[in-house]
Image (cartoon, coloured by chain):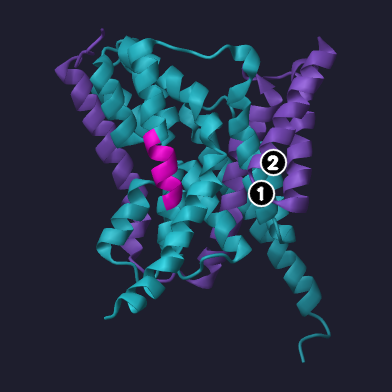
Amino acid sequence: MNWGGFGTLDGWLAIAGLAIGTFAIRYSFIGLLAGRKLPPRFERALQLAVPAIFAALVVPLILLHAGEFNLQLRWPHIVAALITGIYAWWRGGMLIPLVIGMATLHGLLRLAA
Amino acid sequence: MSIGEIKANTAPSRSAFRAGVLECLALIPSYVPFGLVCGVASVQAGLGEWGAVALAAFAFAGSSQAVLTQFLSGGAPLMIAVLSGLVVNLRMAVYSAAISQRIAGASRMERVLWAAFLVDQTFISNEARRSRGEYEDHPLPFYLGCAFTLWPWWVLMNAIGAFAGAKLPTSWQLDFTIPLSFVAMVVPLLKSRGQILAASAGGVAGVMLYAMPLKTGLIVACVFGTCVGMLVDTMLTKRTVSPGAAR
């Protein structure tokens, strides 16, 4: 039975540092603005910033293999993501688009093999 | 206050909580591979099994946990490792700004709860709920339903990785459920032309800037996408509003 170890003091300082710092980032605007409304211009910018940052997060995860664009390896992922996106746009939901996307991916990967 | 009144008050918030749980249950598989990997990496970095659990519980931010443990394993100074992890989490400031505009009138305790569980998945689930116009009077219970599904599961996956050193076969491609789940949540949010352009520009910039260290490319891509969206928005409104339309 492995009862687990506690590591080093430095390790715990690192854990505390990341935890406290991350909370500070999360609380930053929530705490600073505390219910104050930003001017409409910023409100509009935020409405655009959300899709922009999620696209920047997601598109590389779909297209890139080991940091390089690789159509030969990634085309099944690209098709799977497109089908997931089309279904989600049409019907919404979470579980069904995910299942459809993963089924597509595995089907295409088997086809390609 | 009668029991009937209390029930009338808590029933909708309880159903909002339940809807949040249901919304995020589908995301559970996407946490498995990365959670296990983070747990394994934490032990390898010398945090110990319980350090791994504490890191997952208190940071609750996978990519930054991975960066922190990677730097510690490589023998980087403590400060550098922590700061690098924090830079990875800077995108959460954007989420914080967006949430701050949605929770007018929240008490300090409520604001702390909003902040504590702010990760990609809880944030975007809340945006999706808003765009569907559901539970407008009970956003926090919905959000907490989401958080109380994902947070314990994340800690558990890290613990299994740390204690059992378990990993999943990569051929399952289960990690691909992360981008797929974001696609499924973000696509229905794209309603205006500006948003579609912002997403397109952000996606292209995200790929071009992928090599920038510590995911800083994300922040640049976010600013770029937002500017493109705003520029096109203003141009379109000017064209439709200006000449003869100015009565």
Mark 2, other Cα within 10 Å: few <14 / some 14–19 / many ≥20: some
Q: CA distance from mark 2 to mark 1?
A: 7 Å
Q: Secondary structure at mark 1?
A: loop
What subunit carries mark 1? A
Q: Is residue B138 left or right of residue A99?
A: left
Report the amino acid beneath label 2.
Ile
Mark 1, other Cα within 10 Å: few <14 / some 14–19 / many ≥20: some
Front position in the image: B192 or B221: B192
User: What residue did someone put label 2 on?
Assistant: A96
What subunit carries mark 2? A
Residue B146 falls within the magenta-colored stretch: yes
Q: Position of residue B208 (x, y in %)?
A: 65, 31
Q: Are marks 2 and 1 in contact (CB under 8 Å)?
A: yes
Residue at image coords 41%, 60%: B140
Q: Is residue B123 left or right of residue B67?
A: right
Please identify the quadrant where the C terminus of chain B is shown.
bottom right
The tint of chain A in the picture is purple
Q: Position of residue A111 (x, y in %)?
A: 84, 15
